[in-house]
Amino acid sequence: MKKILTLAVFILILSGCSSLKVSHDIEPDASFASLETFSFQPHTAANRDTLNEDRIIKAVKNNLESKGYRSSKIKPADFKIQFQLQSTPNVPSNVSFGLGLGSFSGNLGGSIGTSHRKTYNQETIVIDLLNPTNGKLLWRGTATDKLDQAETPEQRQAQINRLVNAIFLNFPN
């Protein structure tokens, strides 16, 4: 019983450490049953991060194709996709550490506590599916997580894949 309790506490601690937050919103009258093809809205902003844009496009395309949708480049698509990548630097962390010392029968005790405010960088990917005829939003998925320092392009693609996969996990089919 003690091993099971220890394991349960460990799992709760690990699940509390996850910083990934995912949300979805959907147009109540939207029907996804007739949708088959998609295309991407072109980005027009100056100073674009084309490296990460290409990584997001690859991840979104892989997710949608695995769900049976097809990319359309020739005929008008059934829905359009636009996305945003937002980075927020210096987000405060709420981490504190403590150390304690005690005894059951000797009435000896002590405690040392410290709190150190750390910051981290946060990244949010917002993916919108739009009606191509009127531009209205059909569905929006958002994922926010701590931004790890990716040292290689492969590591950066893996980070983006993780966020995009989390967004499309409960995508309506």
Image (tube, grey):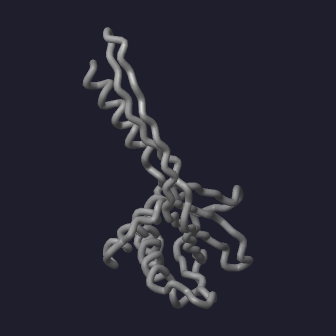
Q: Position of residue 36 (x, y in %)?
A: 52, 72
* Rendered view: 47 above or below 26: below
The image shows a total of numbered marks equal to: 0
The one of 167 and 79 positioned closer to us in this rendering: 167
* Rendered view: 25 above or below 100: below
Q: Position of residue 57 (x, y in %)?
A: 47, 78
The one of 135 and 107 positioned closer to us in this rendering: 107
Question: At x 46% / y 58%, what residue is drawn?
Answer: 166
In which quadrant is the N terminus drawn? top left
Question: At x 61% / y 70%, what residue is drawn?
Answer: 129
Would you say 58 lies left or right of 119 here?
left
To which quarter of the image does residue 9 belong? Answer: top left
Question: At x 59% / y 56%, what residue is drawn?
Answer: 24
Res. 158 in view: yes
* Rendered view: 105 above or below 16: above
Would you say 99 lies left or right of 32 here?
left
Question: At x 50% / y 65%, what residue is drawn?
Answer: 121
Would you say 87 lies left or right of 97 here?
right
Farthest residue, direction top: 105
Q: Position of residue 35 (x, y in %)?
A: 57, 69
Q: Position of residue 109 (x, y in %)?
A: 38, 21
Res. 173 in view: no
The one of 162 and 78 positioned closer to us in this rendering: 162
